[in-house]
Image (spheres, rainbow, N blue to C red):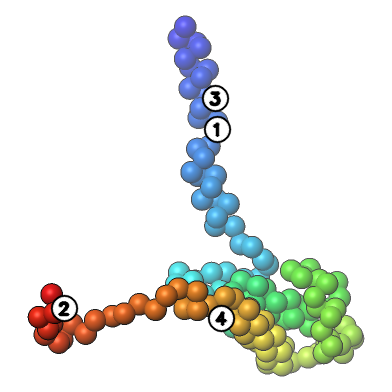
Amino acid sequence: MEREQEESTMRKRRQPPQEEMASHVATRKPYRGIRRRKWGKWVAEIREPNKRSRLWLGSYTTDVAAARAYDVAVFYLRGPSARLNFPDLLLQEDDHRSAATTADMPAALIREKAAEVGARVDALLASAAPSTADSSPPVIKPDLNQIPESGDI
């Protein structure tokens, strides 16, 4: 009897609680090269090859925009063999160059191009998102500094 209780206790210890598993999944990054700030903004950055420094690619309202900015920068830094978040979308860009010409591209230009793509994606996603003000009825906010009339009470 005691042995059965010990075995059931051991089985319970081996299985992680559902809450821990759910929180682990929720904290997983959805894309490479991005992270989320405490206040909800998404930022993208990438390490320069053979250096300890990082290239700051910008701060964005959506994770997709930050991931697209990362994709542009990693493509220009590492060429066509780079691991991208959206490999099929980068090939649609009309401004990409061959790997031979991007090897000596300055970091400032890479940062500028990545920020441009990220901002464009952010703007497209923001304009495509349905506005909550259009769908809900207008809220009438009373002026709390005025004395109510007798008919309002």
CB of mark 3 within 8 Å of CB of mark 2?
no
* Residue 59, label in figure: 4
Badge 2 or badge 1: first in the primary sequence: 1
Residue 139 showing in the rendered view: yes
Residue 127 coordinates in the image, percent (x, y): 61, 82
Q: Amino acid at mark 4?
A: Ser
Which mark is nearer the camera, 2 or 4? Answer: 2
* Residue 15, label in figure: 1
Q: Secondary structure at mark 1?
A: loop
| Structural crowding at the residue carrying mark 1, measured as other residues with C-alpha within 10 Å and reported as few (<14), some (14–19) or many (≥20) | few
CB of mark 3 within 8 Å of CB of mark 4?
no
Residue 2 coordinates in the image, percent (x, y): 45, 9
Seen as rendered, the residue at the extreme top is 1
Badge 2 or badge 4: first in the primary sequence: 4
Q: Is residue 82 above or below residue 144?
A: above
Which mark is nearer the camera, 2 or 1? Answer: 2
Q: Cα distance, mark 2 to mark 4?
A: 48 Å
- Residue at x 88% of width, y 83% of height: 99
Q: Cα distance, mark 3 to mark 2?
A: 66 Å
CB of mark 4 within 8 Å of CB of mark 1?
no
CB of mark 1 within 8 Å of CB of mark 3?
yes
Q: Secondary structure at mark 3?
A: helix
Q: Amino acid at mark 2?
A: Asp
* Residue 27, label in figure: none
* Residue 152, label in figure: 2
Q: Is residue 13 above or below residue 66?
A: above
Which mark is nearer the camera, 3 or 2? Answer: 2
Q: Amino acid at mark 1?
A: Gln
Q: Quadrant of residue 76?
A: bottom right
* Front-most of residues 127 and 53: 127
